[in-house]
Amino acid sequence: MSARVAVLLSGRGSNFLNLHAAMERGEVPGTIALVISNVAEAPGLARARQLGLPALALPYGESPTREAHDSRMRAAIAAAGAEWVCLAGYMRLLTPGFVAACGQRVLNIHPSLLPSFPGLHAQRQALAAGVRVSGCTVHFVDAGLDSGPIVAQRAVPVLDSDDEDSLAARILEAEHAAYPAALARLLAGGWWIAGRRVHFPGPGA
Ligand code: GRF
């Protein structure tokens, strides 16, 4: 069964492109049903159009409230027949109404090992804290900030020579491995959530 996935993004869209490529290679049993951006000029949205994928700009300013904006997004996602929503550099919090309506079908990728360093500039936060290991986290989205149940994490070293850019580049490589793998694992089904923990079927479950 192939899942229909909507992607929300605000920027360059490398995670979106990477998910799409993994789907094209058959590594994730899904298709990108729609790409939505709150930033009309986001490079990720332009790439979606170039690839011939349905792409929609929904600038915040066009809606009177956050709730109204997210209702428009929900309507577009439903019209595209998407069952899953993947945030890929989407720089806004989703409203509780949106999250509740989508159930456990919204994922995000964050460039730190959550719960450390949620929010903006996660790599800068990691360097400032002096951690020797950082990484990325794929997690379910709830109404909080980078706070939903964790699906997958990948660790990378933090080197003495790192600045924000070099650390971000190393983490991004891990993101590009982690996100498609996590989505494929979820699409295979059989998982459940108990408290804050996501459990998968099979050995060690
Ligand atoms: C990634 O680092 C992701 O973890 C964070 O925003 C960045 C988006 O990068 N949420 P891209 O637009 O997918 O290239």
Image (spheres, helix red, strand yellow):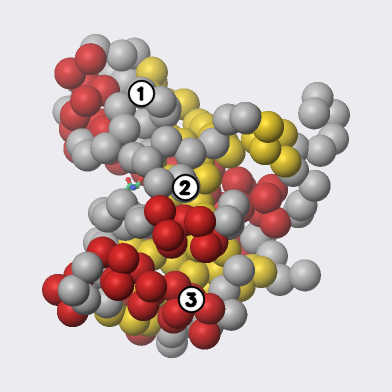
Instruction: Give the alpha-carbon distance from disc 1 to disc 3, as whole Å.
Output: 31 Å
Secondary structure at numbered mark 3:
helix
Residue 141: image tag: 2
Q: Which residue is mark 1?
A: 116
Secondary structure at numbered mark 1:
loop
Three-letter code for the amino acid on which mark 1 is drawn:
Ser
Q: Residue 80: percent from the left, percent from the top?
A: 53, 82
At a point 60% along the width and 69% down the height, the residue shown is: 83
At a point 31% along the width and 66% down the height, the residue shown is: 67
Q: Residue 170: percent from the left, percent from the top?
A: 35, 35
* Residue in front for this viewpoint, 119 or 134: 119
119 sits to left or right of 48: left
Three-letter code for the amino acid on which mark 3 is drawn:
Ile
Image quadrant where one finds the C terminus: top right
Q: Residue 26: percent from the left, percent from the top?
A: 68, 66
For the residues carrying marks 1 and 3, which lies nearer the camera in this image? 3
Does any portion of residue 176 appear in the rendered image? Answer: no
At a point 61% along the width and 48% down the height, the residue shown is: 181
Q: Looking at the image, is mark 1 or mark 3 earlier in the sequence?
A: 3
Q: Residue 154: percent from the left, percent from the top?
A: 50, 31
Instruction: Give the alpha-carbon distance from disc 1 to disc 2, as whole Å.
Output: 16 Å
Contact flag, marks 1 and 2 (Cβ < 8 Å): no
Does any portion of residue 45 appear in the rendered image? Answer: yes
Q: Looking at the image, is mark 1 or mark 2 earlier in the sequence?
A: 1
Contact flag, marks 1 and 3 (Cβ < 8 Å): no
Secondary structure at numbered mark 2:
loop
For the residues carrying marks 1 and 2, which lies nearer the camera in this image? 2
Instruction: Give the alpha-carbon distance from disc 2 to disc 3, as whole Å.
Output: 16 Å
Residue 77: image tag: 3
